[in-house]
Image (cartoon, rainbow, N blue to C red):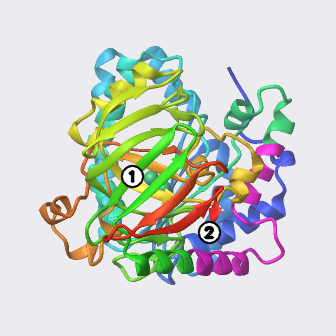
């Protein structure tokens, strides 16, 4: 298999430049003198170069980029000795962790083919993932604990575009994915920075309303769904821009449409059906139906990918419990596009969703000061996994349930009530 490193003619250079500007000014809020560590697929070089320019124009100290290559990844699966699959570049991640500890910001360009490894030996994929997660831990902790400002944006890699639009010629597929990324990332308007400021204000208003309600639970009802999601004690809703521990207010995800918080790991009851397929490491899991008792999934079915789903649930004890609940209106631009991106960064912003596994400590009042034991006592879940899947649609209603049982409409027919 081979493909050109990029298809510049299919990607509008003016909009790509706007995306780079939004990534630096809104996504990172990169500070004068701050260093930047960037990772990107080689196919995303045009965007990586524009981001580097905007970073230096914003006064960056030093921009250091690391590039990955799908062909090189596949070469490992074709030719590397078996022992290779338990190895990872721990020295690189230790260096990144050191850069973050010294104040650097982090930017990742996403865009790899989500199905790249779907034809490889699942045992080797799992071993390589595990070795990588273990080695990545020192760097990931700084990001997951929100010590630093960070951001992810996407580039329309040809291999990803062909996955989404298999019947189109490559140029057309790349142009369609580019348009979808630009629209979802709000850079197809005259003033993207102003559009993001307005969007952040709107998400902040939704979060503030939910925080003021102090709901004990959310109840989702719809076709195949009657689910009560208890919320963690002292939970806090977040959405859009938020402030890292280094004091910089950034937008970690571009795009983002969700407001989200931490469910109570032991207070989820009922059954729920997925409303969109879940793409997990090269497998499509469709029509998920699960039943919860006291927060734990006790039964899991899927029309496609059921074995993979059950394997995921057996990862550890926390994999059967929820770590996130998020609200996204059905009219969100990503949902309106009707596209399945096979990429959580986009697909989780198309519908209300829940996530199996690890919770976010920042979704607690005073989350930065809580210990792991306090978070667990308040209902926060812990797991090696965090997998979002969609349970919202225009046929799902959501009520907030107050501690005294009073019910307040939150969403009707998929829209804010
Ligand atoms: Zn989410
Ligand atoms: Zn999530």
Q: How many numbered markers are drawn?
A: 2
Residue located beneath label 2 in the image: 417
Q: Relative to 115, is 139 above or below?
A: below
| Residue in view at x 42 percent, y 77 percent | 213
Residue located beneath label 1 in the image: 228
Answer few, some or many: residues within 10 Å of disc 2's Cα (few below 14, many 20 plus, some between 14 and 19).
few
**Quadrant occupied by the C terminus:** bottom right
Answer few, some or many: residues within 10 Å of disc 1's Cα (few below 14, many 20 plus, some between 14 and 19).
many
**Bounds of the magenta segment:** 175-203
Q: Is residue 200 magenta?
A: yes
Q: Is 357 left or right of 155, judged from the image as shown? A: left
Viewer-proximal residue, 118 or 314? Answer: 314
Look at the numbered disc 2 and give the secondary structure of its residue: loop
| Residue in view at x 78 percent, y 78 percent | 191
Disc 1 residue lies near ligand 1 with CB under 8 A? no
| Residue in view at x 65 percent, y 75 percent | 199
- Label disc, if present, on residue 255 of the rendered structure: none
Percent x, y of residue 286: 55, 28
Percent x, y of residue 361: 29, 65
Quarter assignment of residue 312: top left
Percent x, y of residue 88: 32, 36
Q: Is 392 left or right of 355, judged from the image as shown? A: right
Q: Is residue 92 magenta?
A: no
């Amino acid at each position: 298999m081979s493909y050109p490193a990029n298809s510049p003619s299919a990607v509008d250079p003016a909009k790509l430049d706007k995306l780079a500007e939004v990534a630096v000014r809104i996504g990172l809020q990169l500070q004068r003198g701050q260093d930047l560590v960037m990772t990107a697929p080689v196919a995303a070089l045009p965007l990586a170069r524009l981001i580097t320019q905007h970073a230096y124009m914003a006064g960056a100290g030093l921009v250091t980029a690391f590039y990955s290559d799908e062909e090189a990844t596949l070469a490992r699966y074709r030719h590397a000795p078996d022992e290779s699959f338990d190895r990872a570049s721990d020295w690189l991640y230790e260096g990144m962790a050191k850069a973050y500890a010294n104040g650097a910001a982090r930017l990742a360009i996403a865009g790899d083919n989500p199905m790249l490894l779907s034809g490889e030996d699942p045992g080797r994929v799992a071993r390589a993932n595990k070795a990588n997660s273990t080695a990545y831990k020192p760097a990931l902790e700084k990001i997951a604990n929100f010590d630093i400002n960070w951001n992810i944006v996407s580039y329309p890699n040809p291999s990803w575009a062909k996955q989404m639009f298999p019947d189109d010629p490559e140029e057309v597929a790349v142009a369609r994915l580019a348009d979808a990324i630009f629209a979802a990332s709000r850079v197809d308007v005259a003033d993207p920075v102003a559009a993001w400021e307005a969007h952040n204000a709107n998400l902040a208003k939704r979060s503030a309303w939910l925080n003021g309600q102090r709901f004990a639970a959310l109840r989702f009802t719809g076709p195949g769904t009657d689910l009560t999601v208890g919320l963690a004690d002292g939970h806090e809703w977040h959405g859009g821009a938020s402030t890292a521990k280094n004091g910089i207010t950034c937008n970690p995800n571009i795009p983002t449409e969700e407001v989200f918080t931490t469910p109570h790991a032991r207070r989820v009851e009922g059954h729920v059906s997925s409303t969109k397929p879940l793409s997990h490491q090269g497998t499509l899991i469709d029509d998920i139906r699960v039943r919860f008792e006291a927060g734990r999934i006790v039964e899991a079915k899927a029309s496609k990918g059921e074995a993979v789903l059950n394997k995921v649930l057996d990862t550890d004890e926390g994999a059967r419990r929820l770590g996130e609940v998020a609200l996204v209106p059905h009219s969100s631009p990503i949902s309106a596009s009707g596209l399945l991106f096979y990429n959580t960064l986009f697909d989780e912003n198309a519908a209300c969703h829940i996530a199996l596994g690890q919770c976010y400590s920042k979704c607690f009042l005073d989350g930065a000061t809580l210990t792991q034991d306090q978070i667990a006592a308040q209902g926060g879940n812990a797991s090696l996994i965090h997998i979002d899947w969609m349970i919202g649609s225009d046929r799902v209603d959501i009520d907030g349930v107050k501690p005294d049982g009073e019910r307040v409409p939150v969403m009707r027919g998929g829209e804010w009530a």
